[in-house]
Image (cartoon, grey):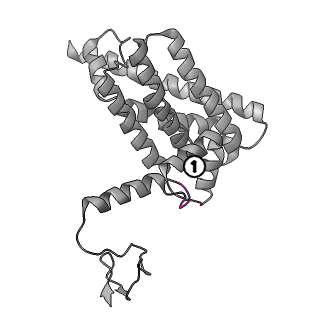
Amino acid sequence: MSGCANCEAVLIADQRFCGACGQKVLAGRLTMGQIGQDFLHALTHVDHSVFALIKGLLIRPGVVAREYIDGKRKKYFGPFAFLVIMVGLSTFVILLLGIQWFQPIPDKVVANLLQRHFNLVVLMQVPLIAVCSLAFFWRERLFYAEHLVFVAYTSGLRVLFLAVTLTPLMFLTGADTANFKLFVMFYGLWLGYFAFASTQFYRGNRAWTACKAVLAAALGWALTVTIIFVFIWLFARFAE
């Protein structure tokens, strides 16, 4: 008999998991092989993986978010961990490929500052869209935190698309963020996806729900842009 390394509960011979805390019984010191196994398990485990979550968010995003807030949390990779990982991935790809996301801003000092903090700019949109969703769907009687879960999941998939599709496309074609067609394509797809997800997450008439979702997402984006312009104005004023 031995003790659990995590909670020190008594273990019997050949026991694989602790009956008290659920941790896997560990033998010996940590190795790179164990780290690799844990990483692959986190990515590919059927019931709690990033890949399974991405598949779910592609075909039934509103259902995934609704099940999560209804209590089925062990089934899914968490919304905020997913969002942070996707934002980190997109930031890495943008820096790696040298895409200047804030190129249209004339003040290069401000543009470079925003570029360095691209992750914060993206994350800032999530609570703003959630606030707008709360306002447009107040009859749903959902808490702000529940709207936030839905927006985090859908925004995570949007950022993943930005990392693996849009940014490489801009790099290969030489397009920049001032390209109007690129702007329309990206935000058109995002608004369409958010509307589709909302018809699964919120109750009521699907067409009306989709319209309100588009307005909520567009208003959240407009608030983000407004905050950025206020920051630029303040930066220019105090830099004088």
Q: Return the residue nearer the eye: 204 or 53.
A: 53
Residue 75 included in the magenta stretch of the image:
yes
Q: Where, quadrant-wise, is the N terminus in this rendering?
A: bottom left
In the figure, 176 relative to 80: above or below?
Answer: above
Q: Residue at the bottom extreme?
A: 1
**Can the viewer see residue 142?**
no
Q: Residue at x 21, y 16 (%)?
A: 239
Q: Position of residue 196 (x, y in %)?
A: 67, 34
Q: For residue 102, which quarter of the picture?
A: top left
**Residue stretch in magenta:** 72-76
Q: Residue at x 41, y 16 (%)?
A: 172
Dominant secondary structure of the residues highlighted in magenta in the image: loop
Query: From the viewer's perspective, is 123 left or right of 56?
Result: left
In the figure, 143 relative to 187: above or below?
Answer: below
Which residue does the numbered mark 1 point to in the structure image? Answer: 146
- Tell me which amino acid carries mark 1: Glu
**Can the viewer see residue 191?**
yes
Q: Position of residue 153 (x, y in %)?
A: 53, 43
Q: Residue at x 69, y 45 (%)?
A: 140
Q: Return the residue nearer the eye: 69 or 48.
A: 48
Query: From the viewer's perspective, is 75 left or right of 160?
Result: right
Q: Residue at the front extreme?
A: 33
Query: From the viewer's perspective, is 11 left or right of 50?
Result: left
Q: Position of residue 187 (x, y in %)?
A: 55, 22
Q: Position of residue 237 (x, y in %)?
A: 27, 14
Residue 120 included in the magenta stretch of the image:
no
In the figure, 192 relative to 150: above or below?
Answer: above
Q: For residue 86, which quarter of the picture?
A: top left
Q: Return the residue nearer the eye: 236 or 50.
A: 50
Q: Where, quadrant-wise, is the C terminus in this rendering?
A: top left
Q: Residue at the left extreme?
A: 240
